[in-house]
Image (cartoon, rainbow, N blue to C red):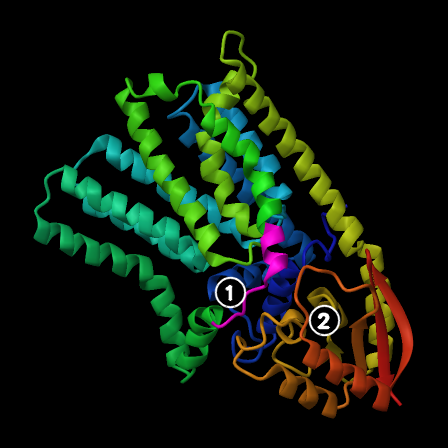
């Protein structure tokens, strides 16, 4: 059961933990470090402020956001296919997002509907081709892109593509180059405005450098993940292949070029999809949820094959590729959601683990060298480091990219003698390359000054708990 389960995904757990500590006075990027935009944490800050269980709040809002995106996908798909195909495209979106671990609270869940709405408004602007109102229409579209950037900076690629298509429309309706350049400046300023406002708020407390490093510089300093990242790319390519087949076997591809409205929509939507694919490939690492932004444009482009799936007289390639996509999305989404519970743990396991840790911490500090941020939020104890996301200190990839030396930071943490220290006792997984230096430091510190007093299990993972001798 995912609803109400705090252990769905480590990223979602961290966003909620950051929001919870922000609500209690911690400043993102300064007191707790990460490289996600402030807008994403602000969304979770809103979820924390809602009445009731914050886990259930963010999950219900995530489901609503996915449903909203599916409706926009359906509306876009109507430009390419019959109402049946458009509804199926929306249904495929609903099923496929969980297949890429975007079931409830990952960032694409919240920025996909914003970017898809921008694409819909762009398409309408092209269909109207009204030069008199284009500046205002472009301003609304680029404001949506600006909001999406504050949820996930990966939206920059889709935003650039949409901006270029707006400029192409301006040229088409006869704008002279000076007016086109002026509009480009206005639209760029609007798209950047939310991020600039956040930067200004950090500059006001003399922390602009902390914001710039966390949000922009640090991602360029990450080390490549080597073979694990290529295995993830291969796995995601297989997961996306049903969409590719549907698009390749579009039954209306040739006939569609005789329909100017459909031809225009297909070109614009293909450019949007291409930008999303380019952003996915360039960012590297290729974790499963990185494919989330591709699902909306690919589902739209798959609509003609989906419409053909249940109709006789259509080319067999289109019928079977559409059926394959529907089946793969439904099965993939169900399997991944079930696997999330099996791999990450249940709400009952979470409650047992937090009770054990809370009783041992008393009023001291709790440090996870390996673990899940949900436990930090559940226990509510002091965290002896600003690097509360465990991978920042225990993986090789993040070593030079957090603005501090991980080995020095781990030594400093252990010198403070946390009341409870948590490390994994499961077999090492091949998802991340380990930081052998920090792991050696941890092993030595535990051997010299700590005793193992308990073990907790969350899904497939076993953790040992240590306390000072």
Name the residue located 55 percent from the left edge and 23 percent from the top edge.
322
Hey, which residue is sitting farthest right in the picture?
A: 453
- The quadrant where residue 414 appears: bottom right
Helix, strand or loop status at disc 2: helix
177, above or below 238, in the image? below
Circles 2 and 1, Cβ within 8 Å, touching? The answer is no
Which residue corresponds to the image point at 64% horizontal and 67% vertical from the top-left? 17
Which mark sits nearer the N-terminus, 2 or 1? Answer: 1
Q: Measuring 83% from the left and 64% from the top, which residue is drawn there?
A: 426
Residue at x 42% of width, y 21% of height: 81
Which stretch is magenta? 221-232
Q: Nearer the viewer, residue 312 or 140?
A: 312
**Can you see residue 131?**
no
C-alpha distance separating marks 2 and 1: 19 Å
Whether residue 345 sits left or right of residue 401 in the image: it is right
Check if residue 363 falls in the magenta segment: no
Say which residue label 1 marks.
36
- Tell me if residue 89 can be seen: yes
Closest to the observer, 139 or 337: 337
Residue 352 at x, y = what percent?
86, 63
Write down the residue under mark 2: 376
- CA neighbours of label 1 inside 10 A, class few (<14), some (14 to 19), many (20+): some
């Amino acid at each position: 059961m995912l609803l109400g389960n705090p252990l769905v995904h480590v990223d979602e757990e961290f966003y909620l933990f950051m929001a919870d500590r922000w609500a209690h006075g911690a400043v993102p990027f300064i007191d707790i470090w990460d490289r996600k935009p402030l807008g994403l944490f602000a969304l979770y800050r809103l979820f924390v402020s809602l009445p009731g269980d914050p886990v259930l709040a963010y999950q219900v809002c995530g489901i609503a956001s996915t449903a909203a995106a599916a409706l926009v996908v359906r509306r876009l798909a109507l430009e390419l296919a019959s109402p049946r195909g458009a509804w199926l495209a929306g249904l495929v979106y609903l099923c496929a997002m969980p297949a890429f671990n975007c079931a409830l609270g990952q960032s694409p869940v919240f920025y996909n509907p914003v970017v898809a709405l921008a694409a819909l408004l762009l398409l309408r602007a092209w269909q109207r081709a009204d030069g008199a109102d284009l500046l205002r229409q472009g301003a609304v579209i680029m404001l949506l892109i600006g909001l999406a950037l504050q949820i996930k900076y990966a939206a920059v690629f889709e935003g650039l593509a949409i901006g270029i298509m707006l400029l192409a429309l301006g040229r088409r309706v006869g704008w002279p180059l000076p007016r086109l350049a002026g509009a480009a400046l206005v639209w760029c300023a609007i798209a950047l405005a939310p991020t600039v406002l956040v930067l200004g708020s950090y500059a006001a407390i003399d922390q602009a450098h902390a914001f710039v490093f966390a949000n922009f510089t640090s991602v360029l300093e990450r080390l490549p993940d080597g073979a694990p990242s290529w295995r993830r790319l291969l796995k995601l390519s297989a997961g996306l292949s049903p969409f590719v087949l549907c698009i390749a076997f579009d039954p209306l591809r040739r006939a569609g070029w005789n329909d100017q409205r459909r031809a225009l929509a297909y070109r614009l939507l293909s450019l949007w999809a291409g930008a999303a694919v380019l952003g996915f490939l360039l960012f590297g690492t290729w974790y499963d949820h990185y494919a989330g932004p591709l699902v909306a444009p690919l589902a739209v482009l798959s609509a003609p094959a989906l419409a053909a799936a249940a109709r006789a007289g259509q080319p067999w390639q289109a019928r079977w590729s559409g059926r394959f996509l529907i089946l793969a999305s439904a099965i993939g989404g169900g399997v991944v959601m079930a696997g999330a519970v099996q791999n990450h743990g249940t709400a009952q396991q979470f409650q047992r683990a937090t009770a054990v840790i809370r009783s041992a911490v008393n009023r001291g500090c709790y440090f996870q060298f390996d673990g899940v941020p949900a436990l930090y939020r559940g226990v509510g104890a002091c965290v002896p480091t600003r690097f509360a996301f465990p991978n920042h200190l225990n993986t090789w990839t993040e070593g030079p990219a957090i603005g501090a030396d991980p080995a020095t930071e781990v030594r400093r943490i252990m010198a403070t003698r946390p009341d409870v220290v948590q490390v994994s006792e499961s077999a090492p997984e091949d998802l991340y390359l380990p930081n052998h230096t920090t792991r050696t430091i941890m092993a030595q510190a535990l051997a010299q000054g700590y005793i193992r007093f308990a073990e907790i299990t969350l899904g497939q993972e076993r953790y040992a708990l240590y306390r000072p001798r």
